Amino acid sequence: MIQRAGAGPAPIPQKELTPETLSAAIRYAVSPEVKRAAKAMGEKIRSENGEEKGASSFHRHLPLKTMR
């Protein structure tokens, strides 16, 4: 999700993890375009009211009949 939004690098599979691939991912992660994408993603997440929606979903899915 983060990578698809342009807000971070692609995951590096363990077998491909080298100092070079890690340093390239870090350089990409601190680039201006990634910082802008991460900022936009953060603003969107903050506007979603996730706590209320999460609690509401939790309560909606409780098996009330079997809990009594």
Image (cartoon, helix red, strand yellow):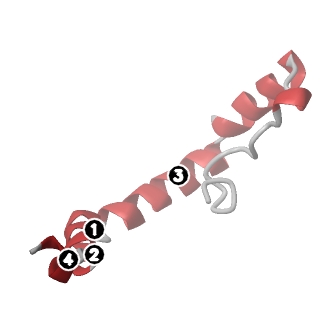
Mark with earlier residue (4, 3)? 3
- Number of labels in the image equals 4
User: Separation of disc 3 and disc 1 at Cα?
Assistant: 22 Å
User: Separation of disc 2 and disc 3 at Cα?
Assistant: 27 Å
Mark with earlier residue (2, 3)? 3
Mark 3 sits on what residue? 38
Left or right: where does residue 32 sit relative to residue 46? right
Mark 4 sits on what residue? 66
Is disc 3 surrounded by few (<14), some (14 to 19) or many (20+) residues within 10 Å? some
> Which of label 4 and label 2 is nearer to you?
4
Q: Quadrant of the C terminus?
A: bottom left
Mark 2 sits on what residue? 57
Identify which residue is drawn at 90% across, 30% down: 16
Identify which residue is drawn at 21% across, 67% down: 55
Q: Amino acid at mark 3?
A: Ala
Is disc 2 surrounded by few (<14), some (14 to 19) or many (20+) residues within 10 Å? few
Is disc 4 surrounded by few (<14), some (14 to 19) or many (20+) residues within 10 Å? few
Pointer 2 with pointer 1, Cβ within 8 A:
yes
